[in-house]
Amino acid sequence: MTRRTVLSADLKERHVNMMAFSACIGFGLFLSSGKVIYIAGPGLAIVAVTLASSVMWSVIACLGEMTALFPVQGPLFEFPGRFIDEAVGYATGWITWFAWVVILAAEILAIAQLWKFRFDEPYLRDIGYPDETLGWSTEGYSPAVWVFLFLILVGLINLLPVRQYGQLEYIFGVIKILFISLLIVFNVIVSAMQIVPHGNHFWTWNKPYGFASESLVVHPSNDADPGIVLRGDQGKFLSLWTAITAALFSFVGFETIAITAPENKDLETHETIKLATKKLSMRITILYILGTFVGGLNVPYNDPNLVSIQINSVRAGHNSVFILAAVRNHLRGWPSIFNGFFIFSATTSGINALYNSSRLLHALASIPEAWPVWAQNSRRRLETTTSRGVPLGTVTVSWCVGLMAFLAVKPFPSVVLGRITNNAVVSELICYAVICLSYIQFYHRIKDAAQDPTLENRTAFNRDDKQYPYRTHGQLFRAYYGLLFCILLIIFNNWRAFVHPFSFPDFIASYIGIAVFFALIAAYHVKSDGWNPLKWRRHASMQIQRPPPKVVVPGRRRGHLNFPNPKDSIWTEENFRAIVAFIWGWLK
């Protein structure tokens, strides 16, 4: 019996669009946006989110262009291995896979926390809420119950054939994008109506609150003594930097577009990678900036529940700036509705995290060199797929590692969650930096190939040719920008760990990923080149013929407005249909 090892190419563009969107919208936007507002202030929070989105905008374009030209399996580590060094590629693959199973555990941990929805009664009295209590009766249940139930749900959905899985993700993504849009409108209406008068529609932007936070507590705690407090320009700059690192976790997931490449259908016809990349960049950036903006309209950044986020990382829905907006405006029912949706959102992101981790592990399983000799039998078993193309082995292994979500039963799960997510973000930042560096090498390689007269298909590598599948203006500069920004974020992501008193657990959570990355690179070089570092060589094939580069028929480019009859009025039937098709192509 022939062993099946290939995935099924059944995903359409709309599936990929919403899979990537759903991966980015977990608990980060709904719970972490309040943390960003508290750290930096409502104005600087928007600056922080904009800068964080610019990093995503740079990296996703680098990854999208390479994947559109070469839709390889495991692009997150295939391109670094091809254009930088094989050892760098393998190390990137392993830390990225682990980051995604950590994100799976973090999403499940967040779900367990969200079921502990309960406001403190003194807080409700202080803001004049009409009810004495506000919360769910589920707060007394053990977190292990929710972890177990939602892990089972996440695992079962990932066993579906990819076409059915994509349909579900499409539905999830549409629900999310509609809810977020309505949530933004809700906050604008509440601010305009001033259900609870607060003087000015932009009250949190005026003193005594201000555009930016007045100070930054380096080591926040529940103690009466705040410890080291930074003020002035130094405090504002470090608040902005800390807010950027906090916001970045919300953007993790955009690489889903590239991970789905082997399961994409009709890449040339539909230009899935190009359109999905551009749509995701616009949707995520606009929604996150607007969400952060409206979050600062109804909730002061020094609200006690936002302070609690800073102290204990993510606790529950009562720390969400959107729920606080409803509560502070004395609205019944809405807080529970919002919290319920946050559980749904974190669940769908956990489903996507398992998908990404399983596909990355399956791609690694197809490379014998990425595994030690003693693990080759396990690798071959992980490489197999079902008759419907589902990598059952890698789904199971990734799901089992996600059992670390049972850390929710610990006394301080919010602290554990904060450290887990910080570790995952650092690993993802390493991956993004490597992708930008890979693109720089890729850019010069295809530029040389386009000018090589010995290559028969050299026009396929010409970025100015109309057949080139996807390019953006100034992409080389964006690659350098993304590389530099990611390196700075990796090094200074948790600068507070170095300020007295030194926090060893926070230091380990923030920087262990860097040590592991370089240790894996060294291990692969020892395996191939021996123990003497002086004899280590760079193994980068730089090959651009396998798989053959994808080209697109110039007359059928999607995402461009081309009139069938350019000399006629635009309101002729054929030209009008072209306009409708163009608008629908970007909206759907």
Image (cartoon, grey):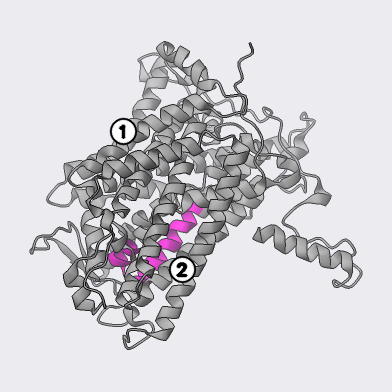
Find the residue positioned furthest to the left.
224
Looking at the image, is 473 positioned above or below residue 508? below
Amino acid at circle 2: Leu
Looking at the image, is 379 positioned above or below residue 37? above
Q: CA distance from mark 1 to mark 2?
A: 41 Å
Frontmost residue, 57 versus 142: 142
Q: Residue at the location (81% across, 45% down)?
A: 553
Looking at the image, is 455 positioned above or below residue 267? above
Q: Which residue is mark 2?
A: 183
Q: Are marks 1 and 2 in contact (CB under 8 Å)?
A: no
Overall secondary structure of the magenta stretch?
Answer: helix
Q: Secondary structure at mark 2?
A: helix
Relative side of 103 to 160, left or right:
left
The numbered mark, 1 or 2, whose residue comes first in the sequence reads: 2
Q: Which residue is mark 1?
A: 515
Q: Residue at the location (23% across, 48% down)?
A: 415
Numbered range of the magenta stretch: 34-56
Find the residue positioned furthest to the front.
137
Frontmost residue, 502 versus 114: 114
Q: Report crowding for label 1: few under 14, some 14 to 19, many 20 or more residues within 10 A (C-alpha).
A: few
**Image location (x, y in percent) of residue 14:** 64, 50
In the rendered image, the quadrant that contains the C terminus is bottom right
Relative side of 195 to 143, left or right:
right
Amino acid at circle 1: Ala
**Image location (x, y in percent) of residue 403:** 33, 34
